[in-house]
Amino acid sequence: MITFNGKYFLASMVLLAVLIGIALFVKDSFVRPFLGDVLVVVWMYAFLAAFLLVRPLVLSLFVLVFAYCVEIGQYFRLVEVVGLQSNKLASIVIGSTFDWLDLLAYTLGWGVIWVFQKQQGKEV
């Protein structure tokens, strides 16, 4: 179950660099809030796939459900409920603003993973 896949690890590092670049330098209404959320799901999948030998469908669904849970936590103001609103890192990682479009972005990210795995000939 534990493994190391250099290709997925490299992909996750490239995606992480892109995500950091978006967070630091892009201030728009599409790339940062929407495309960034699509990419974060792909990044999480690639990072976990670098270390876990799990069927692609199972791993991608786990990542999708995790992303949904984070967004639902934002809806219920989880950061405030657990008293972390003054913790900048927690506010960034967990987030504080619920948006229905984020759920769509996460789903599209899952779709990107699914299409990629199908093109690779892997059982999805």
Image (cartoon, helix red, strand yellow):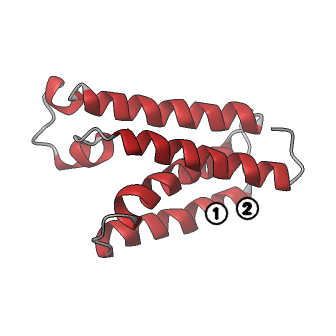
> Looking at the image, which is closer to me, 4 or 8?
8
Amino acid type, callout 1: Ala
Residue 66 image offset from top left, x and y in percent: 49, 32
State how far apart marks 2 and 1 are (Cα).
6 Å
Q: Quadrant of residue 9?
A: bottom right
Circles 2 and 1, Cβ within 8 Å, touching? The answer is yes
> Looking at the image, which is closer to me, 27 or 9?
27
Q: Which residue is mark 2?
A: 7
The answer, for residue 53, to whether it is visible in the render is: no
State whether residue 46 is above or below residue 1.
below
Look at the image and tell me in which quarter the N terminus lies. top right
Give the secondary structure at mark 2. helix
Residue 63 image label: none
Counting every numbered tag in the picture gives 2
The answer, for residue 42, to whether it is visible in the render is: yes
Q: Which residue is mark 1?
A: 11
